[in-house]
Image (cartoon, grey):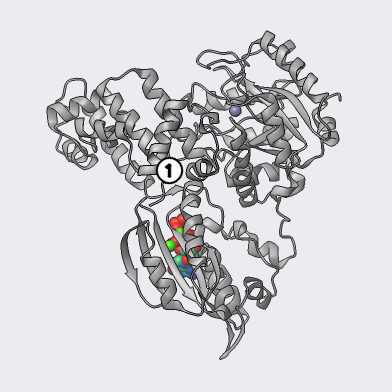
């Protein structure tokens, strides 16, 4: 069974957790956590990179030792260190660490004093009032543990789209290889480019239905076959991801694709619109009385209703049907529209690659400019740049730019927004740069009014170009900070500042609704990779998916501008 990046990340997270409960060296623990993050965000499968002879030590935070463990996992499906740790500790104990408020010390106490080893046992103990009796715990802690357990149960049912994509690809390929298969598409929330998916919905058209079902239920990553009929089935993959399959004839493929792409709200609205025109719409086609008038392609379904094709990212019943009716659907931005990227790190701060390597990779991705925006020197940021180091990086950029043709590195920084909204670098330093990204990396839990004032003040700063990852959320890990985002977005529009759509799979920040708010407020959005290595430039693809969900067109996206126009907009001298 092939090992996916998500498996590697999970193994490393597990090792880190177990080491943490054992009270191991914090640096060692951090190394595993960083490695887990690297693999969970990597857009290429490690096993494919290895097969292609790539050197994994070029990835952020991966040295020889960790690269060796990845190879071991890929080759054998096991990791010796993890197996050993698991013998020393009950594995479910690590799940307790994921409950907000429970660190290794408390987990150890719960385990030793109450024998609590699983989240379920934890919930029982909390409900029975046994936790408040422990040393270092109180009634309040007990209550928040119970709440956290419930919140986590809701959250954990969904997985990142970028992670699901790793499983989707190989499954689709396996089914596409079955003789008689014509089309294979991942429908559902996956096709609508949602940030997270509850399950995968696979649609296949084939002449031999039984062969497709056989291949599906015997796929080598199946943990459990939940159901298997003639034309529909559901499996649970070993990763815990559920996949629903529908097999249809080529004739009704379009209607089925429309139905299973959803969203449910969009489907219902479309069906209602059909009813008004005397049409019946279901997953087999569009019918007038007994005659079938459309359904072979998705476009034909919309056409039968007198509508233009509505892209999947818009299908949330958020006004797209009305806009389609009046001929005002947005012309959504596409990856090919991006001319550059305004957020990237190098090994000068916490990135992995050199200026030159980042430039080459960006050029290979079809970009004509890349802003280098390493972190500012500040408390808690490792290797942040101060004025002197920024200056010498700028000189290196000038030298390199002299050697490129058709490509330009821009000079920038990602500067911390301090607690009170001031920036961590002086005006003089900032004024010399082309791109200043202001980001919050601390004090996430200020009260709403103070957090809002803080961001507004940062946007008022004359040298700020972009507000970085504006809400600060990490999908499934950290909630957005409490801030009046509407006001922040309006302010950016008024001030002529730009808002980042950070494309890291864990961030995708701005979210879709905020993108749309930015569009309405006249604040341009910059779709940025926030690359910490050359591999991460591929993040831009996810960012574009999110931007499309937010109704953004090419004109609403700052980095669709060619360099000359961008320079004019940012007031940079060539
Ligand atoms: P998810 O899986 O929670 O991320 O979201 P979806 O949108 O993929 O939802 P899912 O997997 O339950 O169903 C896939 C699509 O099938 C959904 O987007 C629309 C269609 N569908 C499912 N149930 C219904 C229904 O009761 N009525 C209609 N009209 N469509 C449905
Ligand atoms: Ca789904
Ligand atoms: Ca489903
Ligand atoms: Zn960054």
Lateral position of residue 321 relative to residue 35, left or right: right
Question: Against 376, is 564 above or below?
Answer: below
Q: Position of residue 448 (x, y in %)?
A: 51, 28
Which residue, given by chain and number where applicable, does mark 1 sit on?
6
Q: Position of residue 168 (x, y in %)?
A: 48, 56
Assess disc 1: are there few (<14), some (14-19) or many (≥20) residues with their C-alpha within 10 Å of its C-alpha.
many
Lateral position of residue 14 relative to residue 321, left or right: left
Lateral position of residue 184 relative to residue 372, left or right: left
Q: Is mark 1 within 8 Å of ligand 1?
A: no
Q: Is residue 1 visible?
A: yes
Q: Which of the image's four quarters has the C terminus?
A: top right
Quarter residue 84 falls in: top left
Question: Against 48, is 174 above or below?
Answer: below
Frontmost residue, 299 versus 125 = 299
Question: From this viewpoint, which residue is outermost toward the top?
Answer: 388
Q: Residue at x 25, y 31 (%)?
A: 85
Quarter residue 226 falls in: bottom left
Q: Tell me which image quadrant ligand 4 sits in.
A: top right
Question: From this viewpoint, which residue is outermost toward the bottom?
Answer: 290
Q: Where is residue 26 in the image (x, y as percent from the top left)?
A: 36, 18
Q: Residue at x 86, y 23 (%)?
A: 573
Q: What element carries label 1?
A: helix
Frontmost residue, 443 versus 377 = 377
Frontmost residue, 211 versus 281 = 211
């Amino acid at each position: 069974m092939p090992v996916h990046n998500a498996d590697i990340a999970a193994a490393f997270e597990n090792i880190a957790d177990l080491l943490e409960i054992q009270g191991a060296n914090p640096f060692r623990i951090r190394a595993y956590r960083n490695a887990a993050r690297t693999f969970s965000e990597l857009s290429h499968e490690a096993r494919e990179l290895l097969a292609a002879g790539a050197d994994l030590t070029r990835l952020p935070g991966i040295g020889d030792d960790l690269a060796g463990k990845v190879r071991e996992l890929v080759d054998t499906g096991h990791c010796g260190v993890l197996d050993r740790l698991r013998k020393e500790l009950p594995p479910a104990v690590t799940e307790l660490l994921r409950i907000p408020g429970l660190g290794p010390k408390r987990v150890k106490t719960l385990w030793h004093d109450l024998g609590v080893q699983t989240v379920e046992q934890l919930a029982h103990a909390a409900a029975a009032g046994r936790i408040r009796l422990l040393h270092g715990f109180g009634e309040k802690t007990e209550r928040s543990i119970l709440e956290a357990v419930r919140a986590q149960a809701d959250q954990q049912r969904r997985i990142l789209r970028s992670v699901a994509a790793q499983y989707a690809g190989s499954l689709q390929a396996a089914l596409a290889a079955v003789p008689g298969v014509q089309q294979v598409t991942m429908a559902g929330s996956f096709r609508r480019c949602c940030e997270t998916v509850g399950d995968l919905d696979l649609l296949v058209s084939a002449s031999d239905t039984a062969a497709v079902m056989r291949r599906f239920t015997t796929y080598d990553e199946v943990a459990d076959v939940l159901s298997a009929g003639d034309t529909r089935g559901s499996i649970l993959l070993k990763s815990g991801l559920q996949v629903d399959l529908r097999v249809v004839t080529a004739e009704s493929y379009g209607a089925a694709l429309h139905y299973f792409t959803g969203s449910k709200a969009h489907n219902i609205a479309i069906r209602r619109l059909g009813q008004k025109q005397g049409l019946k719409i279901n997953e087999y086609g569009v019918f007038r009385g007994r005659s079938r008038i459309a359904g072979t392609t998705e476009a034909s379904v919309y056409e039968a209703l007198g509508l233009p094709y509505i892209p999947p990212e818009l299908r949330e019943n958020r006004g797209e049907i009305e806009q389609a009716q009046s001929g005002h659907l947005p012309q959504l931005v596409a990856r090919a529209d991006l001319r550059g990227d305004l957020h990237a790190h190098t090994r000068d701060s916490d990135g992995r690659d050199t200026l030159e390597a980042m430039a080459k990779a960006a050029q290979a991705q079809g970009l004509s400019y890349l802003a280098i925006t390493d972190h500012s020197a500040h408390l808690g940021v490792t290797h942040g740049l101060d004025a002197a180091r920024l200056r010498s990086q700028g000189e290196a950029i000038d030298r390199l730019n002299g050697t490129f043709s058709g490509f330009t590195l821009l000079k920038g920084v990602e500067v911390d927004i301090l607690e009170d909204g001031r920036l961590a670098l002086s005006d003089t330093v900032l004024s010399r740069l082309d791109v200043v990204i202001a980001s919050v990396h601390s004090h996430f839990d200020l009260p709403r009014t103070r957090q809002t004032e803080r961001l507004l003040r940062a946007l008022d700063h004359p040298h700020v170009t972009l507000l970085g990852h504006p809400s600060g959320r990490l999908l499934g890990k950290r909630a957005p900070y409490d801030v009046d985002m509407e006001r922040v977005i309006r302010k950016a529009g008024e001030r002529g500042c730009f808002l980042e759509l950070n494309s890291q799979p864990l961030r995708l920040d701005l979210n879709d609704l905020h993108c749309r708010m930015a569009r309405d407020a006249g604040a341009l959005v910059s779709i940025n990779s926030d690359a910490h290595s050359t591999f991460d430039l591929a993040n831009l693809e996810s960012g574009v998916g999110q931007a499309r969900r937010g109704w953004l067109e090419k004109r609403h996206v700052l980095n669709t501008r060619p360099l000359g126009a961008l320079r004019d907009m940012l007031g940079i001298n060539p």
